[in-house]
Image: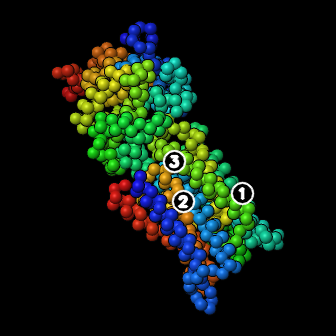
Amino acid sequence: MSRRMTGLGFLTAMLAGLAVLRLLIDRDPVHGLSLAWPDASYAAFRWTAILVSIIIGCSLATSGVLLQALLRNPLASPFILGLSSGAGLGVMTAMYIGFATGNDALRSGANAGPALIGALLVLTVVYGLGRRRGLLDPLSLVLVGVVVSAICGALMMFLQRLSPEGLRSDILIWMMGRIPQSIATSHLILVGALAFLGVLIAMAMGRAMDAATLGEDEARSIGLSLGPVRLSMFVLAGALAAASVTVAGPIAFVGLIAPHAARLLIGPRHTLLVPAAALAGASLIVAADAASQALEFGAGRMPVGIFTALIGGPAFIWILKNRQTAGV
Amino acid sequence: MTSTSTEQHSGPAASLVVDHLSHSYGDIVALRQVSAIAQPGKITALLGPNAAGKSTLLRCIIGAIKPTSGRVLLDGKPTHGRSPYHLAQRMAYVPQRSTVAAAFTVREVVELGRYVLPRNHHRIELALQRMELTDLVDRPYAALSVGQQQRVTLARALAQLPNSIEDSAKAGHLILDEPVSAMDLKHVRDVVVLLRELTGQGVTIIMAMHDLTRAADMADDVWLMDEGTLIAGTACDVLTVERLQQVYGVPFEWLHGRLLTVND
């Protein structure tokens, strides 16, 4: 128990430290990189970016924990079900329609609607095809997710070929994921509330997720109602990932690596794994956003998804090696 | 004791009844009109060649699959369609090999047996001790040998069984699918002793297995399956060399109290 509490404390401290770092990092064309308390005019942007990072990190990590439990697969991530390509296709379609009709608002891809519609459409299709004898089936879900991803990818490529050059790079940047420094208050409250509730509900489902790690017959035999539990995991994981995609695009790796980092610190039981993963996910995105703020390559701000993958990828391999030597 | 009549025995009322059960997977018929009664507080050995229908029967009994026709009655009510929450309080299930898709320790796996039941530290400790797992409690389940894993799964089922010493009317049911197939001889013997003890507390046990001699030794009743049909009775009645030769397709003989296949 104390080891788990120490783990949670460590993650909280890490998140706080990274948030302060993100707040202080300052880069301007004259003085270059420095650490300074921001002016009031900048502070609001930075606080927004930090808040959004935390919300997105909690959402994606919780979604990852839920999907790894649902699919009984440690390689599952929120985007394995094709949700990111679905959202991407939604955004791409809206951008293309905006370009074709001269509607600049749609063309910019800033609107959250198309991403949400694309993500929800994909979730509905995957849900419809991912069942066997009325029960959501892990293998069917993964296979359908992969195929739906491929189809959405092909359609995106199709639209890309029809589009002018500028539109192509815009959609590429969107697909890498980025943390906005300003966002509509209502949008922020909505995804923030969903992330907060999502973490709480997932914690409440912790023991059910523990039981769901057993095979189907066994899970039932110890008293788990698999149908309702799998459906809840699917809906909650999908909603959290879809909500975060509407704010930041599909940010890679967070939903995959945050649960594993949390497991290393506090073990596999889900009730505490959920908040630990949420803290780890939030830390990773804040860190990646800080990196994206600090590093300048003369080509404008890099999408934050580049840094989550660059930080998360090696970290994931390190965790993998450590798990093996620990015999876990 | 015939298998289809409830009126003949005078012990406690049968709580587990298989009633004209049929099941097909598409065109493949797995169970054909199977009927049998599990004697309460007794061990029933479920025997038969591969693909005879043993696992399908067990899965129908635990309510995991809906039979094509017929039903399994637990306390007079069909198991399929009953909530897992209620079934779990009457019946524990041990598959041949339990897969756990998480890095749980031995103790954490055994604790899952109490998933819908009140926390009971004492029952967990007792189950761990009984299966000689106290030295392994903090080891990851996945790192154990298959035989050790089978002991963990049995311990989980022990922790789940209703405490029938306190309330004999609520004696549980233990459904076992080749639970000792990978255990060493000492632990197999321990499990046999344990199962005997459990029947003394009123627990009804159905156990799929392949060792005919052990079945004849330990079981009160034998259910012998062949191509989806079932013959029930005492070991002496059911396990005749003629019938076994017919079912398994090889000649058998009794030698020094052991059933052996004849090598010519």
Q: Which residue is mark 3?
A: A206
Q: Secondary structure at mark 3?
A: helix
Q: Residue at x 56, y 71 (%)?
A: A19
Q: Amino acid at mark 1?
A: Ile
Q: Amino acid at mark 2?
A: Ala
- Looking at the image, can residue A238 be seen? no
Q: Which mark is residue A117?
A: 1
Between the C-alphas of marks 1 and 3, the distance is: 29 Å
- Residue A125 placement, left or right of B88: right
Residue B148 figure quarter: top left
Image vertical order of residue B233 relative to residue A153, above or below: above
Between the C-alphas of marks 3 and 2, the distance is: 14 Å
Image vertical order of residue A4 relative to residue A102, above or below: above
Q: Which mark is residue A278?
A: 2
For marks 1 and 2 on the same chain, the one whose residue lies earlier in the sequence: 1
Q: Which mark is residue A140?
A: none
- Residue B122 in picture, x, y percent from top left: 36, 36
Q: Nearer the viewer, mark 1 or mark 2?
A: 2
Proximity of marks 3 and 2: CB atoms separated by less than 8 Å: no
- Residue B85 in picture, x, y percent from top left: 52, 33
- Residue B75 in picture, x, y percent from top left: 49, 20
